[in-house]
Amino acid sequence: MPKSSDETQKLTTADKCLQEFIYDGNQVEVYCSRWSPSQTTDLSECMLKVKLEDLDKIWAKVLASHREVSFSDNYTDVSGSVEQKFAKCMETYQTCKSEILEALQTFNTASTNQQQIPAHPINDSNSNGCYLKVSACDTEVFHGGYEDWPSFRDMFTAVYKNHPKLSAAQKLYHLRLKTKIQAGLIVKQYPLSDDNFELAWEALRSRYENKRILVDNQVKTLFNLPTIFAENGEQIQKMQTTINNCMSTLNTQGIPTTDWDPILVYLCSSKLPSESLSLWEQSLSSRKELPLWDDMNKFLTSRYEVVERISTYRPGKAKPNFRVLHHER
């Protein structure tokens, strides 16, 4: 039986409500996806307020269209997907708004606390303190790895901590942006204020400036190098890089490693594939003195370059099969 005009009108109205809700929800998600906390280094306080106002206007449309679709005739049929969409949009909106508010809070703190003018002012159009502009050289995000802490500490100190025009609250804001996972949880315990930056910074130092753990991790890495079974340039290069990184980290911790050459050469040799090991031994056949790590290091560089070139000539070369063969008795 064909639907009456009233039923058709109801379906049309219900479908329109649903479409408007989906459209408004998508607008929130698109707007928030274009926002990133790192943008605050280039945005003024006024621009942040404009962005916050625009976000609230878009969210208001979502609330209105969600109300309309909730009272539509076909809500029962689509309630599951509608509420799932609404919950996702709400979480996205709340996260984005909280990040913008945190950025604005740094400006409010800066305005109530006069910043000290440096002895040699920097020629910067943002010298009124309305921007969070820092130098182009930046640090990577720190996730909580002990071996990554020294470089993060030094870079963050150079770029942010010693920045003459950032207030303590602004430094804490950048510290939040540059720490994630375990390190981020430590920093986020401290609310954004001038008094809390040093507390958060010292909390990180206390947690990750553990020399014994850092050294133990490097030694463990050295003694647990994976064995390379096939002639693979990428794996050979990775092993070389791992050893050099471990040695660099140990040296920065004041560990004397000048006499570690026999250990490093043995550890590396024991992990090389048979053909590379044979070539390494051949290179030492006429030598009577002990090889140095520098010798092995140069050999590894040459070896993985050769292996990579061979792989380009014979990309389809089959790799050795290491399955255990069972012989019948």
Image: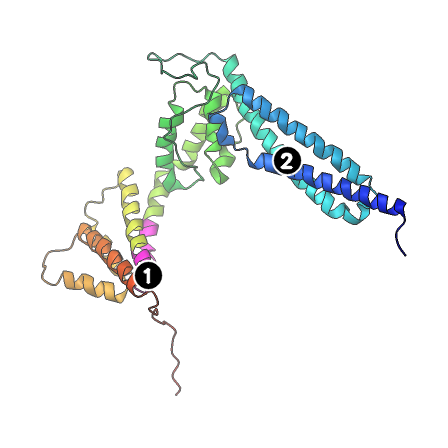
Q: Is residue 54 visible?
A: yes
Residue 164 picture location, percent across and down: 39, 18
Residue 135 picture location, percent across and down: 38, 26
Residue 314 vs residue 161: left or right? Answer: left
Position of residue 298 relative to residue 44, above or below, is below
Rendered image quadrant of residue 306: bottom left
Kind of residue at disc 2: Val
Residue at point 24%, 66% (across, down): 275
Position of residue 285 relative to residue 65, above or below, is below
The residue indicated by pointer 1 is: 227
Numbered disc total: 2
Range shown magenta: 219-236
The residue indicated by pointer 2 is: 28
CA neighbours of label 1 inside 10 A, class few (<14), some (14 to 19), many (20+): some
Position of residue 175 relative to residue 319, above or below, is above
Q: CA distance from mark 1 to mark 2?
A: 51 Å
Residue 96 picture location, percent across and down: 59, 32
Residue at point 23%, 58% (across, down): 303
Is residue 223 highlighted in magenta?
yes
